[in-house]
Image: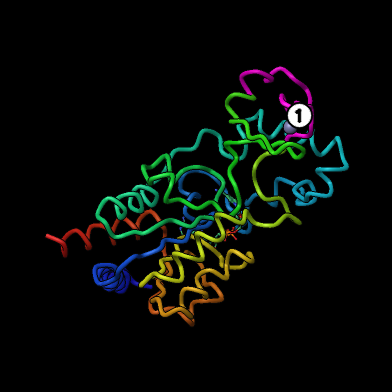
Amino acid sequence: MGQKDQATQIEEAAAMIAAARDMVVFTGAGVSTESGIPDFRSPGGLWSRFDPDDFTIEKFLYSAQTRRKQWHILLSGGLLQEAEPNAAHHAIAELEKLGKLSCVVTQNIDNLHQKAGSSPQRVFELHGTLQRLICLDCHAGFPLETILARHGGSADMPACETCGGLLKPDVIFFGEALPQQALNEALHYAGLCGLLLVVGSSLLVYPAASIPQFAREAGAKLLIVNRTPTPYDGAADLVIHGSAGEVMTGILKALKRRMV
Ligand code: NAD
Ligand code: ZN
């Protein structure tokens, strides 16, 4: 797609956002690739470095070796390597400051929306967060930072400090249900929004990917910003195939011009 076409699409997107009430932004791994965190499915993505089996809840429960691997991922900086938010996260945080956003619903576990300045109480993390560990027995939560500070020298995943139970990164492994409260909040706001903006998601992972469709069926307009096509492109009011950082920066600029 030519430069001029994309500039026109960006203007159209800004007009949609200017006219919309209570917009919801829905993000996936693609919003964070420009921060240096690979997505799952692109070439060189996470599934070319890790075995998906080590991210199933069954294996985590029954294999000490899998738990050790997970602990070593956390020790080595997680999947995140001290990543910083990029232009797309900053643009989304700014949309909130402009009063255009009711919430961010994210599939990401990297905390980058909050780091960019999105209000934590307006970010719903459908797949949990890597910033916390949770005890599978007593459900106590521990900040990753605290656990690393106290047990950084341990060769194995430490036990819960309260009850001695198994600690697990507070992210959704394959085979686990989504956190009910985050899902309820996401559905609530998606059902009320006038516009749902998808940024950087293949829209292939369920049930998270059903949220844009849910919003659409409840009457919202749908705007998709993603590098590659998604199964929902045909249902969208506007699709921009491009880089999240560049496109979101462009949309924000065009929106601000309209708001003065
Ligand atoms: P995905 O890997 O299935 O798809 C990412 C999409 O983003 C792809 O369609 C790709 O074309 C697009 N993309 C990549 N870089 C982009 C960019 N710079 N600009 C615009 N588009 C870009 O990711 P998903 O849909 O989020 O779902 C997969 C799962 O991956 C989720 O469950 C999520 O929890 C998890 N995940 C999270 C992180 C993270 O926290 N940063 C990283 C990897 C995977
Ligand atoms: Zn416990």
Quadrant occupied by the C terminus:
bottom left
Of residues 258 and 122, the one drawn nearer to the viewer in this rendering: 122
Place of residue 57 in the rendered image (x, y in percent of width and height, measured from the top left): 78, 49
The residue sitting at 39% across, 49% down in the picture is 89
Q: Which residue is mark 1?
A: 157
Residue range corresponding to the magenta coloring = 148-167
Q: Residue at position x 75%, y 26% from top?
A: 158
Q: Amino acid at mark 1?
A: Met
* Residue 196 vertical position relative to residue 137 in the rendered view, above or below: below
Q: Residue at x 27, y 73 (%)?
A: 12
Image spot of residue 134 (x, y percent): 67, 37
Nearer to me, 115 or 242: 115
Q: Is residue 237 above or below residue 172?
A: below
Outermost residue, right side: 62
| Quarter holding residue 218 | bottom left
Q: Main secondary structure of the magenta part?
A: loop
- 166 falls in the magenta region: yes
Quarter, ligand 2? top right
**216 sits left or right of 94 in the view:** right
Which quarter of the figure has residue 42?
bottom right
